[in-house]
Image (spheres, rainbow, N blue to C red):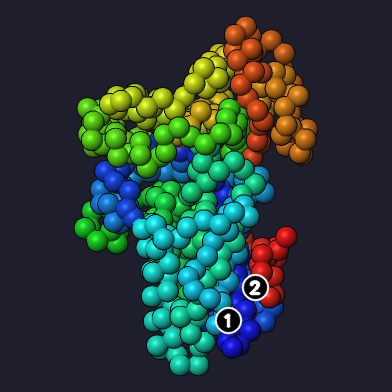
Amino acid sequence: MSERIIYRASTTAPVNIAVIKSVFPQQASQFLHPGSQFRERSIDERVQTHRYWGKRDPRLNLPTNSSLSVTLSQSDLRTHTTASCSPSYSAPDTLLLNAKPQSLSDARSQACLTALRSLRADLEKSNSSLPPLSTYPLRLCSANNFPTAAGLASSAAGFAALVRSIADLYQLPQSPTQLSLIARQGSGSACRSLLGGYVAWDQGLLLDGSDSLARLVAPRSHWPEMRALILVVSAEKKGVSSTTGMQTTVQTSTLFQTRATQIVPKAMQAMEKAVAEKDFESFAKITMRESNSFHATCLDTDPPIFYLNDVSRAAIKGVESVNEKAGKIVAGYTFDAGPNCVIYYLEENKDVVAGPFKDVLGAKEGWEGAQGKSVEGKEGVLEGKVVESLKDGVSRVILTSVGEGPISVEDHLIDETGEPVP
């Protein structure tokens, strides 16, 4: 019988809500001591500011253009993952997601696991005193505190948490930027979730993808006043997955090449400048324009992809009404591959921006926390069909802010015996 020694490490990772994407051709694909000693990580959710919709290489998950995102606070949206290995575990590797078994046989998962095991094996070869963790089967347990596959970038948070937790389990010396090369192969936007604050995913030019990685644009401390109000329009699984949408768009959209080669590169430069100068009006304008451009490309796909619905369009009109009432740009909307609306604003404008939505949606779940309670409702800004659509179509709201990168935590989803925690 194998020795009952359990090694563990855990991560909580936030969601990526895209604001600007490029299009992808295809979807490819020191050690911990025995017993109860383990570490846990927390990776912040990030909302993309430049969408990376599109991949150059089917195996390496390389995008057709760079992107930029905002890491959101892990206290509001996260994936929690525990990685565990033991000589007593039986093969193959296993994963529980929200208490349900999931396959790890797909190309994306295998690419991440193989790369991480290879790095650990290199450590073991250089130091024979290390236990051979790379040879042990893995048990992974993961849970989301948000709907999976509902346009809240669950796969990005999931792969970021998976890579970070296993890297901690294996005590790999690689930096978050280096690990982003691995996370990218699981889910493109996952690479940005390994850093906090404002993060770019550089397109890169090399065929092996070694220069297509995450890069810190600015830490959270540079512009901590950034806030986000998420209107959860639908908690249902998307009708068209991001991967399928990417493939179809590259194959059929006539707008794709122009967007990837001309529009987004200019927007990236402008967005990095806006972040560096903490210029919210420029940040919001670029964010909204890029969101519209992205969804125009989706509509140009054959057959067209409709991620937005009537409630999404009501949210857009709501933001326009807020800005008109303020007499300047104080809010910026964005939509990823789904109908949920993310509205950016600064803390100083919380009542001006979030207030009108609280007046209409105050009975919905999500205002109970400190951020929600601090918002004062504003009557009369949103009117008519906008109010009706939002009340009927928004299921809940999430108030969050720009957040940090990975943080160690002590909640464990696998116990000392290697079993899932109930």
Query: Which residue, given by chain and number where applicable, does mark 2 sit on?
Result: 418
Residue 257 location (% of width, % of height): 22, 34
Q: Quadrant of residue 211?
A: bottom left
Residue 137 location (% of width, % of height): 50, 74
Q: Amino acid at mark 1?
A: Ser
Residue 58 location (% of width, % of height): 27, 52
Query: Marks 1 and 2: CB-CB under 8 Å?
Result: yes
Question: Which residue is at 59% across, 8% downward?
Answer: 385
Q: Choose between 309 and 175: the one closer to the eye.
A: 309
Q: Quadrant of the N terminus?
A: bottom right
Q: Choose between 413 and 169: the one closer to the eye.
A: 413
The reply, left or right, for residue 261 in relation to residue 366 is left
Q: Choose between 133 and 42: the one closer to the eye.
A: 133
Q: Secondary structure at mark 2?
A: loop
Query: Which residue, given by chain and number where applicable, does mark 1 sit on?
Result: 88
Question: Which residue is at 39% across, 63% downward?
Answer: 110
The reply, left or right, for residue 359 in relation to residue 329 is right
Q: Amino acid at mark 2?
A: Gly
The reply, left or right, for residue 357 in relation to residue 275 is right
Q: Choose between 185 and 5: the one closer to the eye.
A: 5
Crowding at dot 1, Cα within 10 Å, few <14 / some 14-19 / many 20+, comes out as some
Residue 159 in view in this figure: yes
Residue 218 in view in this figure: no
Q: How far apart are labels 1 and 2 at the CA level?
A: 9 Å
Residue 407 location (% of width, % of height): 62, 61
The reply, left or right, for residue 148 in relation to residue 288 is right
Q: Earlier in the sequence, mark 1 or mark 2?
A: 1
Question: Which residue is at 66% across, 18% downward?
Answer: 391
Q: Residue furthest top?
A: 384
Q: Secondary structure at mark 1?
A: loop
169 over 263 or under it: above or below: below
